[in-house]
Structure formats: structure tokens, C-alpha cells
Amino acid sequence: MAGVLAGLFAAPAYAGQDYGKLDAEIDRLMAAGKIQGVGVAVIDNGKVAHVVAKGERNAKGEPLQIDTIMYAASLSKAVFSYYVMMLVDEGKLNLDKPISAYLPQRLPEYKSYADLADDPRWQAITPRMLMTHSAGFPNFRWLNPDEKLDIKLTPGTRYAYSGEGINLMQFVIEQGLGLKVGEEMRRRLFQPLGMTRSSMIWRDDFAGNLADGQHEDGKWEPHDERSSVKAAGSLDTTIADMAKLAAAMASGWGLSPKAKAEWLKPSLRIVGAHEFPPFGSGENPDNARVGLAAGIGVVTFQGAQGRAFMKGGHNEITDNILVCVEKARRCVVILTNNEVGQRIFPPLVQAAIGETGMPWAWEYTRVLPIAR
């Protein structure tokens, strides 16, 4: 195992890449996009090639470092999906078996899911539907006027982004398999990969080197100390740790070739013009041209370098992106502590790993001025 991990973390620059020029481009884009703090990791051939952090982590102007704790937001979903595929690989979880088969009680008998008592469609939901955002749930129940959970689409028919679905997958694992997801992800991913400053729940030792977040108007907001594990978005991490994880994902560490292929297989075609809003974005025929589809916890597409996969993570004070080219095992991870980090993502991804064909217009509904 030690030899495998050493290979993951070696740092050769791939042919033609000048990381000094990349760092200078990051500086330029940060200034042009008015982004205070950025962490960037580049993976090539399944190995960490470059990790850098720039800018400020808080209103005091303290420097953002590669071991500064940053909020992963929905990148948590991609990390969780990799753990889910470990369970699939071991035969503990079947992606196409109804979740009712795993739960000791009917889903509506649990207090958190009592709202579904009068809708039998929950019985058709499978892990694959939950992990491909096709169970028909809203993103979160509190977005509904009555704040109750409902099923808006026939399960399995259409991609509609849902943190509720990802959190239900966590619930099934914990209630049905008796596994504590936060502890299991630490044991099976974070510890063996040397991700010493990553956790699905707040740790007090994070406080000494922590990134606050910045709104588009420049106002700073303190980092949220998340008190419970949420597979949909509770991960705290660093750019150095995310570099290790991206290298593992690119190389298929910890998964059989069959399980990795299943993770990235286009399980469900995506037809919506934008990822948000989940139920009202119309359709875009260009999606079919790039093979836009849901994998397990990630989105896949065909681009200039072949098939690629991606996952974003956003909230009011955070904007992150992971983009990987499958065949070249090349990735870039970008973490920002700013609401509008996406301003610099397209040119920065291209500068780091080349043109990928990333469907930016689908990922981001709100069109922001792109830093040039």
C-alpha cells in the first residue's frame, strides 16, 4: 500500500506544462476576477503534479495556504460517491436494488421521511437514482413552500439535482448497513490517503488555519462549523488534501477496474439546459452532442481530450470545481473562498490541463463576466 500511495503523490510535471506560468496566470485571473483566495491542484497521469494556494483566507488578510481548511461544499458528493463505489465493489450495496431492501423499516416509518407516507413511488427508488440525482426529490425540502419532502418526478426518469437524494443514500447506508458514513470515509479514504486535514464534521483543530468566505459584494462571513455529517455537503478539507483525493480518483485507487468504470459510466442522459433550477431549465440539444450524463455522484461528458468527469461545489461564500480527463488521468481542483470563483474557472481549467470541453453553460445558470 505504501508504494502505491507514494506513486500517487509523486510530482512530475507533464510534458510542456510550466507551473511557473500557471502560477502567474492564477495571479492574473484572481486580480481580474476579484477573487480573494484560491487553491489549485493539478493531477497528471494519476499523480499530484502541482499544488498552490494564493491570496487571503479572511478579512484580516491572513494568507491562504495549501493546508488551510476550506469548505468543499458539494464536492462532498463526489467524495461520498467514491466511498459508495467501494461498498458496491465489495458487494455490500447494489446500485439497482430498491433501497427498501436495505432498510429494516419502511422509509415513511422513519420520522425524517414521514412526508412520503402517501406516495408509494419511494418504493421504486434505488441507490443509482439517488446518486444520479434522478429520484425526483427537490434539492432540499426546505426549498418547498411547506418545507416538506415530496417526489416531484417519477423516480429514474430525469436528472434533477438533489442534496436530499444524496443524504438519503447516507441514511440507507447508516440504517441499512450499520455503517457511520463520516467515520467510514475517514477510515477508508482520508486516513489511507494521508488527508490529515479533512473531515465530514467540524474538528476543533481546524480553527487555527481556517478560511472564511466572501460574498460577491466583498463582505466576509465566518466559516460554518458543521456539527453533523451530511454526505451532500459537510466536507471540510484543504487543497493539499483534495490533490491527494483527485489523484486517487484519477488512478482508480481503492476500486476494481469494474467499479471505477461503473462509477463513471453514463448512467442517465442529462437533457436540462442548466443544472439549476432542477425542475425548470428547459432542454438543450447540445447536451447530447457532448454526451452529457450523470455518473455516480459526478457528471460525465465527451470533450477535446476524450471522456471527462466533473463536480462543482457552491454556496453563498464558496465556489469550487473538480474537472478530470479520464484517459490521461489528468485533473484540476480549484477551491475558492468566494461566491463568484466561477468567474475564473474556464480560463484557469484550460491553463491547468488544456481544453476539456467542460459544459460551463450547463453548470452555471447565472452568467457571470469571465475573467480574461
Image: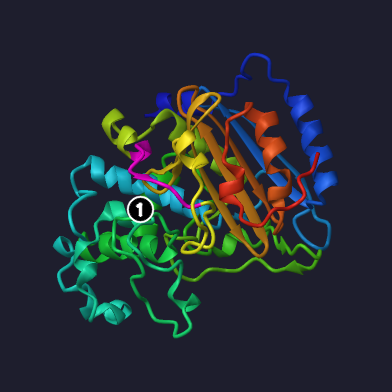
Give the residue type at disc 1.
Met
Q: Position of residue 78 (x, y in %)?
A: 45, 48
Who's the residue at 39% across and 56% down the image? 133
Q: Give the residues in magenta.
A: 263-272
As rendered, which of 49 and 16 lies closer to the eye?
A: 16
Q: Which residue is mark 1?
A: 131
Residue 64 seen anywhere in this rendered image of the structure:
no
Q: Position of residue 228 (x, y in %)?
A: 45, 69
Residue 20 magenta-drawn? no
User: Quadrant location of residue 112?
Assistant: bottom left
Q: Position of residue 203 (x, y in %)?
A: 53, 63
Dot 1: within a 10 Å radius of its alpha carbon, few (fewer than 14), some, or many (20 or more) residues?
many
Side (left or right) of 355 relative to 53: left
Residue 270 magenta-drawn? yes
As rendered, which of 99 and 357 lies closer to the eye?
A: 357
Residue 359 seen anywhere in this rendered image of the structure:
yes
Total of numbered circles in the picture?
Answer: 1
User: Quadrant location of residue 355?
Assistant: top right
Who's the residue at 22% across and 73% down the image? 107
Q: Position of residue 151 (x, y in %)?
A: 33, 71
Is the stretch drawn in magenta largely helix, strand or loop? loop
Q: Quadrant of the C terminus?
A: top right
Q: Quadrant of the N terminus?
A: top left
Q: Say what secondary structure mark 1 lies in.
A: helix
As rendered, which of 261 and 304 lies closer to the eye?
A: 304
